[in-house]
Amino acid sequence: MSKPVSDTDLSGTGISAETGATPFKERRIIIVGGGCSGISAAKLLAERRVYRVTVLEAGDRLGGKAETYWHDGTAHDLATCYLAWGYGTAFRWLREKGMRVGRIQRPVVLLKGDDRRIVSLSDYASGVGIASKMRALPQAVRYIFLWFRFAIAEANNSTSARAAVDLAMPFSDWCRLKRLPVIERVGARALVTAGYGYLEALPTLHCLRWLKPSILFAGLATQVYEVVGGIGNLWNALALDLDVRLNHEVARIETMPDGPVVTTRCGKAFACDDVIIAVPLSQSAKLLGPDVGLAQFAASMRSHKYATLLFRTDRPIFASHHESVGLEKHLGSETLGKTLAIRRTAAKTPHAACNESDNDRIYVSYHLQGTHSLDDLESYLREDIKWLGGHVEAVLLRRSFDYMQTYDQPAIRANIATRIQDIQGRQGIWLSTASSSFEAIENIIDRNEEIVAEMAVRYGRFRTLAAIRLRLLRLSRLMKMVSFLPRLVLAGTNRSREPAGSRENSVARNQ
Ligand SMILES: Cc1cc2nc3c(=O)[nH]c(=O)nc-3n(C[C@H](O)[C@H](O)[C@H](O)COP(=O)(O)OP(=O)(O)OC[C@H]3O[C@@H](n4cnc5c(N)ncnc54)[C@H](O)[C@@H]3O)c2cc1C
């Protein structure tokens, strides 16, 4: 492996090209972690014909938090389950692997207050009727404008000190400051039940990273999909074409003059040109020595716990498949840890769809764990199901996840997001994962696309072209956020329509 001998600045990209280093396509790359972050990074590199790539996964299965659990012949996605508008690359890979998706068929509904009324997300956010929707429209427009301003600054890694102060604020304060109560209500349903945290504590930076216009409208227009057979299959299918080693827990990463060396717990050492770390940032810092400077970033991360219980009730609680119901009485932080949402998990396989008798009584519940034990959560769940008129017959599985690492407020005010970008690629170390983007598949894949494009700028043969490509990628990311608008109109006129150009079939049509 050759060392860099000189740097050429590629103005406008913020990246230095390293001449004399191993060329991009010949680089030996180790990826630590076989979750969606690690597998998608390897897949994106393979698509750019970079083949000397090995993924090391500590466990005996792939997918990390995107785990599909099989019970009685039926697939249940325990955590990650939804893909929405904007998840372009994930949809492309699903098509490539011949996998199908099913659309959430009914509007996302919510039980409102103690009278247990079911309302759609859009009615919950803006109020019922055309007049209230018209009143909400200017807020949506203002939000999109503010979001673009944020996204452009992030894409250019140029967030100002003043903007950083706003981004450190809890999202509920920010919404009030910007007079966006409708957005705050969408956030309460979408961000809180997804386990990202309570709006009173969640920094605006993280909320804006996720609540893109495409996600906002995907929720309101119910353009949300689940993978037939479970999301876990996607990572397994992608891994078939990649060099992936299970049961290879990485113990340390050393940065040597000739490139990093990755050593596993069982003592195998892999010398390479680059390491892509695809495990949460707090864990990454422990693998690296102090010279890479990750410890200061890891120290400002806050991690949350999210718990999931798979359970069977004595009778169907909700009428149709593919429903996700947020319980409004638990959306405020004063009820920290209680049941936030319940999702019906059946119909993921043709078998499940036919076998209504049992599978229409199996649900997944979601809880922000806080300080509560799994026993506490189970008892809250039992109360909630009783409140809904049913009875929990059996809890089939309990699982809790380390989830949603956020920066603390002082770190955001000190512009940590910009500083973390500045160390990307230093000494051959690249940070992928949710911690450097956001805890959702689309954000992770987008970040990996940028990492791969940045590698091409640094080490590729046609660096100016690679730099143009990187700029176009960033631009297309912004355009993607509005490209759904025509589809929004179509969705309004034909609610059963799928994303334009997709070959996926809805589960309903295949039943
Ligand atoms: C309850 C829940 C619901 C969610 N719902 C959605 C959703 O609907 N849609 C969506 O887009 N996203 C969703 N997400 C988010 C999504 O699941 C995560 O953001 C994503 O899985 C994170 O992927 P990752 O690869 O960064 O990390 P992980 O999934 O944590 O994977 C990290 C991998 O690295 C391995 N590893 C750790 N340490 C080492 C080591 N030292 N050496 C080697 N390997 C190591 C781990 O075993 C693991 O396999 C959800 C998450 C949760 C928890």
Image (cartoon, rainbow, N blue to C red):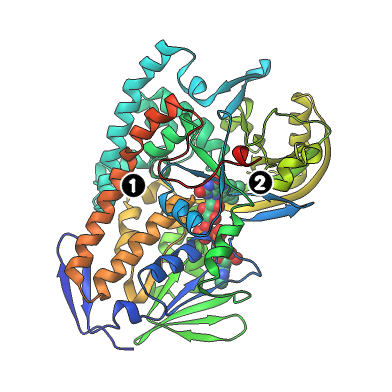
Q: Which mark is residue 413?
A: 1
When asked about the image quadrant of residue 164, the answer is top left
Nearer the viewer's eye, disc 2 or disc 1? Answer: 2
**Quarter of the image where one finds residue 144:** top left
Quarter occupied by the C terminus: top right
Q: Identify which residue, 266 or 336, lies in the foreground.
A: 266
Give residue 179's position: percent from left, percent from top. Answer: 35, 23
Residue at numbered disc 2: 348
Residue at 74%, 35% in the rendered image: 380
- Dot 1 falls on a residue whose secondary structure is helix
Reply above or below: 74 against 51: above
Residue 173 vertical position relative to residue 478 in the rendered view, above or below: above
Please identify the quarter of the rendering in which residue 260 is found. bottom left
Q: Secondary structure at mark 2?
A: loop
Residue type, numbered disc 2:
Lys
- Crowding around mark 2 (Cα neighbors within 10 Å: few <14, some 14 to 19, many 20+) is many
Q: In x, y percent, where is residue 60?
A: 66, 70
Residue 279: image location, x then y, percent: 51, 64
Residue 406 visible in the displayed image = no
Name the residue: 64% across, 52% down.
Answer: 229
Badge 1: residue crowd in 10 Å (few <14, some 14–19, many ≥20): many
Q: What type is the residue that disc 1 sits on?
A: Arg
Measured in 3D between alpha carbons, the distance from the residue under mark 2 to the one under mark 1, in whole angstroms, is: 43 Å
In which of the image's four quarters is ligand 1 placed? bottom right
| Badge number at residue 426 | none
| Residue located 61% across and 57% down the image | 232
